[in-house]
Image (cartoon, grey):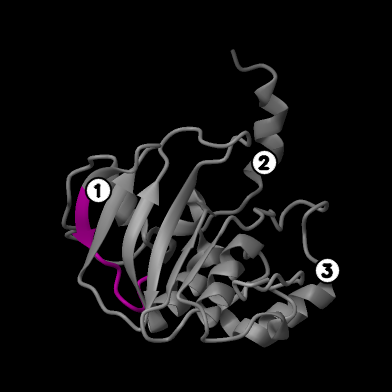
C-alpha cells in the first residue's frame, strides 16, 4: 500500500523467520490460551521440540503458548526501547510453567506496567492481565492498573531478574497489604504433595451442595 504497510500470515512461534527481529517499536496482541493438559490443545512433540530449540529452557512441557508469545514478541521488538503488551491469562503472573518465560523476559526487558482486568472482559471465562515490557529498559517500580477503565492502582516494586513469581503485583492491585516474611524455606522442604486428589475430588463433586 502507499503507507508501506505489510501484512504477513505465518506461525510466529514456530517460524522465527516470519517476523523481522529487533525491528518493531510496539508489539501488541492477544495470543491463544491453549492448556497443555488438554489433549485437544496440547502441542505435538515436533512443535515442542521447535519451541525448545528456539527459546531454550524458558519453555517447559506445560508452558502455555500464550506465554511463549511473550518471548517471540520481545525478540521482534527493538532492543533499545521496543515495547511489548500482550493479553495473557492471569495465571501467567505465577504459574510454574510460565516461570521460565518470566525470568527470560526480565533478562532483556523491564516490566513497566501491569493491567489486571479483575472482571469479565471477554466471552471466555478466563481472568486476564496485560504486562507491558520495555526491552532494554530498567525500572525499580511497576505502574499498576485495573478494570475496564484502566484505573490507576498504584505502583509496586518491579520484579527483579531471576525472581520466580510476579504474584506480589496482583496482591498490590487488589489491595492486600505488603508483608515481610520472617521465615525460610518452602513447604516442599518438609512435605511432598501429589495430584492424586483429583479422582477423589471428582468422585465427591456430585454430592457437594
Location of residue 155 by image quarter: bottom left
Q: Main secondary structure of the magenta part?
A: loop
Magenta stretch, residue numbers: 154-164
Judged from the image, the secondary structure of the residue bearing numbered disc 3 is loop
Location of mark 2 (residue): 198
Residue 13, percent from left and from top: 69, 73
Residue 183, percent from left and from top: 21, 61
Give whichever of discs 1 and 2 has the lower sequence position: 1
Kindly identify which numbered label has been placed on residue 172.
Answer: 1
Residue farthest along the top direction in this orientation = 209
Location of mark 3 (residue): 44
Residue 100, percent from left and from top: 51, 74
Location of residue 94 by image quarter: bottom left
Give the CA distance from mark 1 to mark 2: 32 Å
Dot 2 crowding, Cα within 10 Å, few <14, some 14–19, many 20+: few
Residue 190 makes an appearance in the image: no
Is 132 contained in the magenta span?
no
Amino acid at each position: 500500500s502507499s503507507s508501506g504497510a505489510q501484512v504477513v500470515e505465518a506461525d510466529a512461534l514456530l517460524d522465527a523467520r516470519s517476523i523481522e527481529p529487533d525491528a518493531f517499536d510496539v508489539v501488541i496482541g492477544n495470543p491463544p490460551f491453549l492448556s497443555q493438559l488438554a489433549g485437544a490443545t496440547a502441542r505435538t512433540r515436533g512443535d515442542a521440540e521447535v519451541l525448545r530449540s528456539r527459546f531454550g529452557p524458558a519453555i517447559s512441557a506445560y508452558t502455555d503458548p500464550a506465554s511463549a508469545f511473550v518471548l517471540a514478541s520481545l525478540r521482534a521488538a527493538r532492543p533499545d526501547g521496543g515495547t511489548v503488551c500482550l493479553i495473557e491469562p492471569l495465571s501467567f503472573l505465577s504459574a510454574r510453567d510460565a516461570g521460565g518465560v518470566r525470568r527470560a523476559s526480565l533478562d532483556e526487558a523491564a516490566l513497566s506496567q501491569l493491567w489486571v482486568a479483575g472482571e469479565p472482559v471477554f466471552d471466555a471465562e478466563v481472568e486476564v492481565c496485560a504486562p507491558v515490557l520495555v526491552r532494554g529498559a530498567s525500572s525499580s517500580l511497576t505502574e499498576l492498573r485495573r478494570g475496564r477503565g484502566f484505573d490507576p492502582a498504584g505502583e509496586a516494586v518491579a520484579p527483579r531478574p531471576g525472581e520466580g513469581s510476579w504474584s506480589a503485583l496482583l496482591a498490590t492491585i487488589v489491595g492486600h497489604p505488603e508483608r515481610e516474611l520472617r521465615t525460610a524455606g518452602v513447604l516442599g522442604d518438609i512435605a511432598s504433595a501429589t495430584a492424586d486428589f483429583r479422582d477423589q475430588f471428582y468422585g465427591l463433586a456430585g454430592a457437594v451442595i
